[in-house]
């Protein structure tokens, strides 16, 4: 527990430095209406999420669905 306590100020500084970027990305997610029953809307959200995961070195794969939005699988190692 002590290790975490010591690192908290460092973690907080790193997060504050990225606050504008995180808020912008969250806004992008929120503005993308994606009701579960609307396949095209859910697919549109997956198209926004996939590159964000890829930027973070995740292996990303879409799993096509016929009736509902495609599933997005992101593997982080």
Image (tube, helix red, strand yellow):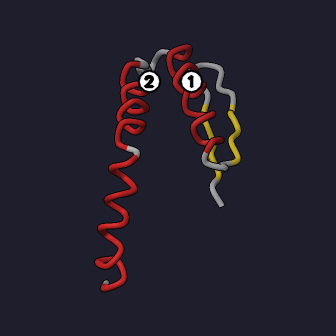
For image coordinates 56% across by 14% down, the residue present is 40
State which quadrant residue 11 falls in. bottom left
At which x and y percent is residue 72? 61, 36
State which quadrant residue 31 falls in. top left
Q: Verify CB contact (< 8 Å) between mark 2 and mark 1.
A: yes
The residue nearer to you, when weighing 63 against 14, is 14
At which x and y percent is residue 6? 32, 79
At which x and y percent is residue 7? 36, 73
44 shown above or below 29: above
State which quadrant residue 49 falls in. top right
Secondary element under disc 2, as helix, strand or loop, is loop
2 shown above or below 44: below
Label 2 – label 1 distance at C-alpha: 7 Å
Q: Which mark is residue 36?
A: 2
For image coordinates 44% across by 23% down, the residue present is 36
Residue occupying the far bottom of the picture: 2
The residue nearer to you, when weighing 10 against 72, is 10
Label 2 crowd bin: few (<14), some (14–19), many (20+), radius 10 Å:
few
Secondary element under disc 1, as helix, strand or loop, is loop
54 shown above or below 36: below
The residue nearer to you, when weighing 43 against 12, is 12
The residue nearer to you, when weighing 14 against 30, is 14
At which x and y percent is residue 21? 42, 36
Identify the residue under disc 1.
Answer: 69
Label 1 crowd bin: few (<14), some (14–19), many (20+), radius 10 Å:
many
Q: Which mark is residue 59?
A: none
2 shown above or below 38: below
Going from N to C along the chain, the mark reached first, 2 or 1, is 2
For image coordinates 34% across by 58% down, the residue present is 13
For image coordinates 35% across by 34% down, the residue present is 23
């Amino acid at each position: 527990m002590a290790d975490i306590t010591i690192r908290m100020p460092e973690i907080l500084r790193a997060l504050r430095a990225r606050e504008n970027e995180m808020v912008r990305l969250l806004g992008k997610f929120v503005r993308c209406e994606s009701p579960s029953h609307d396949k095209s809307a859910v697919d549109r959200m997956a198209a926004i999420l996939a590159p964000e995961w890829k930027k973070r070195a995740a292996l990303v794969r879409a799993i096509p669905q016929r009736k509902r939005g495609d599933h997005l699988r992101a593997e982080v190692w």
